[in-house]
Amino acid sequence: MSTTHITDADPLPSKPWLTKAQRQLVSDFVATAALFVTVIAAWQAFVSAGIVSRHVLPLPSSIPNSLFGLIDSGELFINLLTTLSEAAAGFAIAACVGLVLGGLIAEFRIVERIVYPYLIALQTMPKIALAPVLLVWFGFGLGSKIAVAAVISLFPVLVNTVAGLKSCDQGRLDVLRALGAGRWDCFRLVRLPNALPFVFAGLSTAVMFALTGALVGEFVGSTQGLGYLIVQANNLMDIPRVFAVLTVLCVVGTAIFSAMQFARRKVLYWAPNEE
Amino acid sequence: MTMLRRLSDERGTPSRDAGPTLVSPASPGTAITARNLSKAYATNAGEPIQALTQVNFDVAVGEFVSIVGPSGCGKTTVLRILAGLVGGYSGSVSVGGQVVHGPTPEIGVVFQDANLMPWRTVLANVTLPGQVLRLDPKACKERARQLLALVGLAGFEMKLPGELSGGMRQRAAIARALLHDPRILLLDEPFGALDAMTRDNMNVELARIAAQAGKTVFLITHSIAESVFLSDRVLVMSSRPGRIIEEIAIDLPRPRSLDIVADPQFASTVLHIRRLLEDTGGSPRVTLAH
């Protein structure tokens, strides 16, 4: 009997400085950064050449100045805090209501039959249209912004929770049923964990919707917040300032998205990939 | 604690061919009885489909009995009725001397799919029945470790199901079905989704586990060779509407190895069942006889 031994001790010709995956990452980063620099440079060139008016697009080089001004005066911090608290409160309300209502709809046919038609009617309506009314109902302060954020971000949570709870694999439920498990055990041991990937997808969408909702609420009428800063700067034709706030929003959005991704990996350790 | 003691007793018994005395600590007698069992399913078309007609059989305590039949003959329905998962039948069914009204902890079920919860570790999956039946968590954990060793998964306790192969998942499902120490194990084509070679190995393992655990086992399969290899008795079921057309006692000596396919008695029994099923119009498959 002859055998050929293949061992993992076979030395590679030379050990590379970076693995293939790492090299890929570095080259991706370089390409992305190069694209960014190119676009900004072209933008700067077009505007300073006068092809595009400075009242329409600011000079990219003027944005950092504006941004530092906002930071120095303390305006950025207080307004960012306002918008973030509105979005967070709206998101928290939407998450709680969405989870509980979604659970009731998925578990009890009677709730589904009564409530679902209204939910579908509400869902098909662009909820941003409610913002002016909510301003009247909840006042000029934080309340109306929280309400807009909550209303907009409720539906992704609700719809995904219902879908997740209803999509439960019958085979897994049979395992519990064969043991004589009751409804609550089936829910807590199978249906709910089974729905978590869906719930998380809903929450990820909702958190972004909540930020949008808070900003829209501020556009409609407010004295504080990043939305207020944008409207105010726009009215003064201070376009660099508008872009400075947009830059901040971009960073905040990315940070929230990354935080959700991180939380997803921690909570959904068994389902590492997006749905 | 009694649960644990019983397990260690079972682990001490070498195999089931030493006679009926080691089969079960319970009183001897009948584990499963089905009388005049018939079941029709309603369909959207209006005309109900007759799944089973006049099914009669008994399974003795400690016996390993298989139902073999073509796909769609209603064998899974028999198992689901025994497990208390399907109602609306006529006739009577009793398990452990009790008329079946619903699921009972006397029974452990292994389904065609392992149906493990992907968010639970292998160990937590095996202890799941303990949570449903409100058993002592500590004793359950201890017993789960022993059962995982019994099914050959020692060292995999903290893995997630997604990290296991199909055969290993099915082993974990068997361990889970044994956790609450049911006297009867119902298996619904547990290895149907596995490749032929893994399946053969799993059959050898199942014979060993069933012998060591000393359970009454009721197996549903469409593999004739599998049923003959594993069983004390094979019930042959016709195509729909399903009924038992023949009962065949398998007195091949135990423990049986895969080499048994070369045994003339094995081959003639397989052939006999195959002829029976061909006569009923089914299309049986043979996986062990290669």
Image: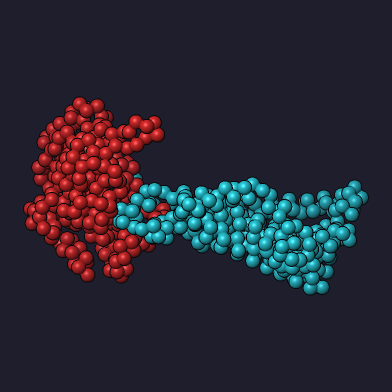
Chain colours: A cyan, B red
Q: Is residue B169 visible?
A: no
The N terminus of chain A is located in which quarter?
top left
- Give the residue at x 29% y 43%: B88
Query: Would you say A155 lies left or right of B140 here?
Result: right
Q: Quadrant of residue A252?
A: bottom right
Judge whether B199 appears above or below A235 on screen.
Answer: above
- Give the residue at x 83% y 57%: A60
- Give the residue at x 21% y 30%: B277
- Give the residue at x 81% y 53%: A41
Q: How many marks?
A: 0
Query: Would you say B186 lies left or right of A95 here?
Result: left
Judge whether B53 appears above or below A101 on screen.
Answer: above
Q: Position of residue B241 (x, y in %)?
A: 25, 32
Query: Would you say A170 lies left or right of B257 here?
Result: right
Q: Nearer the viewer, residue B172 or B96?
A: B96
Q: Position of residue B214 (x, y in %)?
A: 16, 56
Q: Is residue B247 visible?
A: yes
Q: Position of residue B222 (x, y in %)?
A: 26, 37
Q: Position of residue B87 (x, y in %)?
A: 29, 46
Q: Nearer the viewer, residue A111 or A142?
A: A111
